[in-house]
Amino acid sequence: MTVPVRLGPPEHLGLVVPDIEAALGRFRALGHRFAPVTEPLARIRRPGGAVEETPLQYTTSGGELPYVKLIQEVPGSFWQQDWPGVPWHHVTYWADDLDEATARLVVGGFAMEADGLEPDDRVRYRFLRTPEGARIELGLRVNRDAFEAWAGEAI
């Protein structure tokens, strides 16, 4: 029997949407506040070693957990809807040690899907899938304060 991975509550729910501005309007109408949209070059590495670079647009709500993260869909990339019309992309949890948490999750049936890379190729976050197909993101906990500060800019 494996020791369970204790990651704490989910940080955010990642939704991939076809029109981020329209989605922002709808979620604001529900009472959510959002941080400024950021436009990074997302770099992920697949298990076979291939690195994909994708210009992204995304934002996060602020306030109470879990946050709602809206990601502009990029067709043909990792950042697209898995099933047309279903925007759910991932649920994020923080981990102190990505490799240790990953090893425990893999023993429990999860499959590695991709690593999110810093410009110098250090792993910043990791995506895994449950046997049922649900995707989770493990964020490196040392980055939590920066994420929380960004979420705190929600207006």
Image: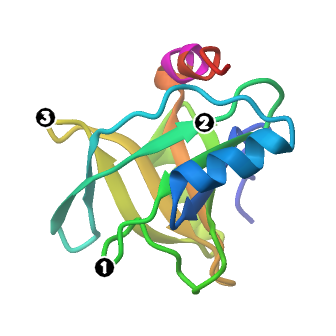
Q: Nearer the viewer, residue 93 or 66?
A: 66
- The mark closer to the camera, 3 or 1, is 1
Which residue was labeled with disc 2? 60
* Residue 120 tag number: 3
Q: Nearer the viewer, residue 20 or 10?
A: 20
Marks 1 and 2: CB-CB under 8 Å? no
Mark 1 residue element: loop
Image quarter in which the C terminus is found: top right
Q: Amino acid at mark 2?
A: Thr
Image quarter for residue 12?
A: top right
Q: Which mark is residue 76?
A: 1
Q: Are marks 2 and 3 in contact (CB under 8 Å)?
A: no
- Residue 28 within the magenta-colored segment of the rendering: no
- The CA distance from mark 1 to mark 2 is 23 Å
Circle 2 packing at 10 Å, graded few (<14), some (14-19), many (20+), is many
Relative horizontal placement of residue 93, taking residue 27 as reference (left or right): left
Magenta stretch: give its range.
145-149
Q: Nearer the viewer, residue 97 or 21?
A: 21
Residue 41 visible, this angle:
yes
